[in-house]
Image (tube, rainbow, N blue to C red):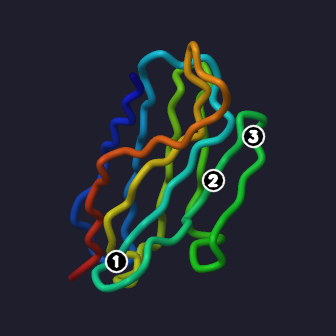
Amino acid sequence: QVQLVESGGGLVQPGGSLRLSCAASGRILTINHMGWYRQAPGKQRELVATITSGGTTNYADSVKGRFTISGDNAKNTVYLQMNNLKPEDTAVYSCNAEIWVYSGRGYSPFWGQGTQVTVSS
């Protein structure tokens, strides 16, 4: 019905940069907001950043000033530019979107499969 496809993860050295992308497709009527979450080994999943369809952004304190979330409403796509990466940013990053599908009765959450980001020298 709805798919979220992520790309852009990988291995990077400390201080490096990566850009994640997440494209939503399927029977989408409208998207309320999209965002990124991450889960490191042995830790709970945590919010990284979100963006509403109107462009309002929200960031975890740990990534403020280093990560930038942006969106393209026409493409139902969200991006996460990650700069000055640190080893503690290592995690599986998952895309989330609140989507109203055709024939639906409200917004429902959808998740991508996740992409690994590893920051190591």
Residue reaching furthest front?
A: 105
Viewer-proximal residue, 112 or 100?
A: 100
Q: Which mark is residue 70?
A: none
**Compared with residue 119, is residue 108 higher up or lower down, i.e. above or below?**
above
**Compared with residue 45, is residue 10 higher up or lower down, i.e. above or below?**
above
Q: Does label 3 or label 2 sit earlier along the sequence?
A: 2
Q: Does label 2 or label 1 sit earlier along the sequence?
A: 1
Left or right of 99 on screen, residue 52: right
Residue 23 drawn at (x, y percent): 43, 32
The residue that appears at 60% across and 39% down in the rendered structure is: 98
Residue under numbered circle 3: 55
Real-space Cα separation, disc 3 to disc 1, in angstroms = 28 Å
Real-space Cα separation, disc 2 to disc 1, in angstroms = 19 Å
Closest to the camera, between mark 3 and mark 2, is 2
CA neighbours of label 1 inside 10 A, class few (<14), some (14 to 19), many (20+): some
Left or right of 72 on screen, residue 19: left
**Compared with residue 2, is residue 62 higher up or lower down, i.e. above or below?**
below
